[in-house]
Image (cartoon, coloured by chain):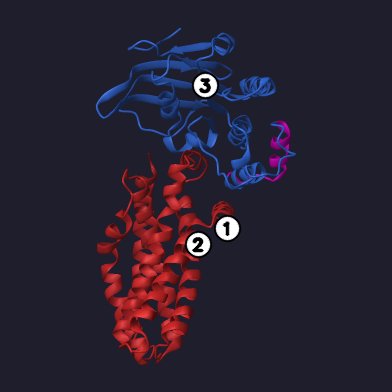
Amino acid sequence: MRRLLALIKKDLTDEFRTRYAINSLLLFAVIALVMVSFATGMAGLSASLHAALLWIILFFSAMSGMGRSFAKEQEKNTAPALRLAAPPEIIFWGKLCFNTILMLALAVLVLLMYIFLLNPSIGNLPLLVLLVLLGSVCLAGASTILAAIVSMAANQGTLLPILSLPVLLPFFLVVINATQTAFQGAGFSQAAGSLLFLVSYAVVIITVSLLLFRHVWQD
Amino acid sequence: MLEVSNLTKCYNGRPVLEDVCCCVSPGQSMVVAGPNGCGKSTFLRLVAGLARPTAGEIRWELDGQVLAKGEVADHLGFVSPELGLYDHLTAREHLSFFADLWGLEQSRVDELLNFVQLAQYETLVGQYSSGMRQRVKLACALVHNPEILILDEPCSNLDQEGIVLVDRIIQQQLARGLVLLATNDAGEVARYKEVLLSLDEKAAGTD
């Protein structure tokens, strides 16, 4: 636990001083939200469109910031010292926790701004908040292992969103559908299947990532 | 003890190291010497477990016990020009981070900062000179009192005081383990070559 906390503290300290990921995440989210609000104006959007727009903004914001979590360790050549000082599982958990903290903070901010700028009609706010938070954990889980894989590639560019698509497609199909029902006012019982899927997705993606990470992390 | 037999490393099919053999006992220092590009750093990365050999065997033994591949890192300190630092952390934060990773008390941090003469600096490592950065790397490698110390060009960028510090580190290390050192400096080769691994020829060998 102490090792894990050390990694999270180091990443948070480094991030708050450089503000690289925070700036990328926030800038993308704010620009996308403002553009969407200008484009749609006062026109009332359907629940399905609101759900899709919300997750598109969250997805691309996440990809623009979290893709750097491992790449900067490789670029700065700090990865070898980490490899020697901590087992791969601890490194993965550290990066996952850091990405989850960032993603949850982003999700809360994006949701608040989305409600403020687009003023959607929300039938079940607690369900919407739960879906956004749970979905953020899934996004953080998937993007952590994918960021580790991409950090080993020579041409990292837009590789992360492209690699993420097949991995995140089933997640998006479920979460967008569930978010739509939350906008429409569905109860928790109606969304139980989707919530269960999201919890299962998070467990599966994190378990598989832990099994794979050792092989990805070795030079 | 380190035993290396027939170690070969190829990059894209091109051999960088071929059939390297050597043996270093506890209390000994081994110098890896040779011109630029002969594979000194590659050799050190391989024995540190930071890269996988194409062929050959690396065997670490400590107190009569053969170390498993995953255990070697627990006993090893590594310093190299290729190793980076976190530019937005201070030296104290670096050492504190590694002390936490190794599960050590924070008193070790103060002890090492005094030892490498960086206790008075609270600025970010990104603002340090290359010599000061080298001192931070040395301190980070020593945090967990490793039995094995691997130093790649340890005196690069160091002033006379820093060179004396490296010498002190090596002498202290020899009392509790072994030191592997890669250098091109003739003085360092002469001083530390209890075992010399010369990589200047295609087929490397030991004296």
- Residue B39: give x, y in percent of width and height: 39, 21
Q: Which residue is mark 3?
A: B180
Q: Which residue is mark 2?
A: A22
- Residue A139: give x, y in percent of width and height: 38, 66
| Residue found 28% across the figure and 57% down from its top | A163
Question: What's the CA distance linking mark 3 and mark 2?
Answer: 42 Å
Q: Amino acid at mark 2?
A: Ile
Extent of the magenta region: B102-115
| Residue found 75% across the figure and 39% down from its top | B120
Indicate the colour of chain B: blue
Residue A111 colored in magenta in the image: no
Q: Amino acid at mark 3?
A: Leu
Question: Of residues B139 and B207, which is closer to you in this image?
Answer: B139
Q: Chain of mark 3?
A: B
Q: Dot 2 lies on which element?
A: helix
Indicate the colour of chain A: red
Q: Which residue is mark 1?
A: A16
